[in-house]
Image (cartoon, rainbow, N blue to C red):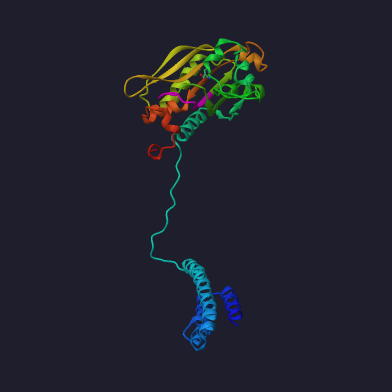
Amino acid sequence: MLNQIKEKALKEIAQAKDLKQLEQIYRQYLGRKGELTMILRSLKDLSDKERKEKGQLANQAKSEIDEVIKVKRQKLSGQAGLARKKDWIDVSAPGFQPPEGYPHPISLVQRQVEEIFQSIGFSVVDGPEIENEYYNFDALNIPKDHPARDLWDTFWLKDIDRLLRTHTSPMQARYMEENQPPLRIIVPGRCFRHEATDASHDVQFYQVEGLMVGQDVSMSHFKGIVEEFLKQFFGPEVKMRLRPGYFPFTEPSFEVDAKREKGDWLELMGAGMVHQNVFKAVGYPLRKWQGFAFGVGLDRLAMVKYKIDDIRLFYSGDLRFLKQF
Ligand code: PHE
């Protein structure tokens, strides 16, 4: 009989759907007039031996039912809380404002550069970050084993005969293979170099390649366009200087510096007149075309513009820095 009562109680508890039903069950079995309570109460009329045996069983059943009800009560009241929360709207509470995103300073600068060059007739094109040796070097007049390769500390990708592009210049060759002059393009993108980092070098950085080719494109076109670009980007009072430089894919080559507020010069770009060997590599007839190319560091532009003295901040993910733009 005791067992029957216990089984019945446990079954009902398991089926109880809400707290009200559960309290009802509690009362039915363990309440003042509950079935189990009555049995416990009746024990006093039994003989010593019987009372001991039956009493133990009845008390075990009681605490088991009690425990199961407790657990179920917790479960049901959790659900009740959830259900209540969902229905309940505090119309006077302040709204939740999700944090707003904003462009990274490098993206801002990239957009500005694109706009300026588009306004002088350049198209924006994109190229792969994973390159092959041919476009990164050979097509740019840097044959295998040529010491000039050392100018670009390269991340070689194991086993697949590819590398992380060390500059955006490979797109010069890729674009000219597919298109005939006259052409005017810029190629913004990420580049990688396997070199020690310091305040002005990081293993990744952004460049914008520029390329203009036509029948009589000369150095004065280059100088005029770069000057115009720098003026639009930094303001009319910007100071720039051209220095002779060396790149295997341009002849002559030069470097362009901009004056920083603190008075020193920061190298912004490498540039030059496209080498005829590059035209040859892409299948243009020799000496038919001429043009200029440049590669400007986006990070460097951003550093001068926003007076940032350490390039590594751009890639630090530090919100205190990033939130200022
Ligand atoms: N690709 C060169 C570099 O990364 C820069 C450059 C581009 C020089 C175009 C000349 C012409 O250093």
Q: Residue furthest bottom?
A: 45
Q: Quadrant of the N terminus?
A: bottom right
Q: Residue furthest left?
A: 262
304 or 54, which lies in front? 54
* Number of numbered callouts drawn: 0
Residue 24 visible, this angle: no
In terms of depth relative to the viewer, which is nearer, 160 or 129? 160
Q: Nearer the viewer, residue 5 or 260?
A: 5
Q: Could you tell me which residue is drawn at 54 percent across and 83 percent down?
A: 50
- Quadrant of the image containing the C terminus: top left
Segment colored magenta: 197-209
246 or 160, which lies in front? 160
Q: Quadrant of residue 215?
A: top right
Please indicate, yes or no, whether residue 236 appears anywhere in the rendered image. yes
Q: Position of residue 130 (x, y in %)?
A: 60, 27
Among the 4 quarters of the image, the one containing residue 186: top right
Q: Specify whether residue 289 is painted magenta.
A: no
| Relative vertical location of residue 91 with respect to residue 45 in this rendering, above or below | above
Q: Which of the 4 image quadrants contains residue 14?
A: bottom right
Q: Is residue 191 left or right of residue 198?
A: right
Residue 225 coordinates in the image, percent (x, y)? 48, 22
Residue 25 to residue 222: above or below: below
Residue 26 in picture, x, y percent from top left: 50, 79
Residue 55 spot, x, y in % from top left: 52, 80
For residue 267, above or below residue 314: above
Question: Residue at 58% of width from left, 75% of height from top?
Answer: 10
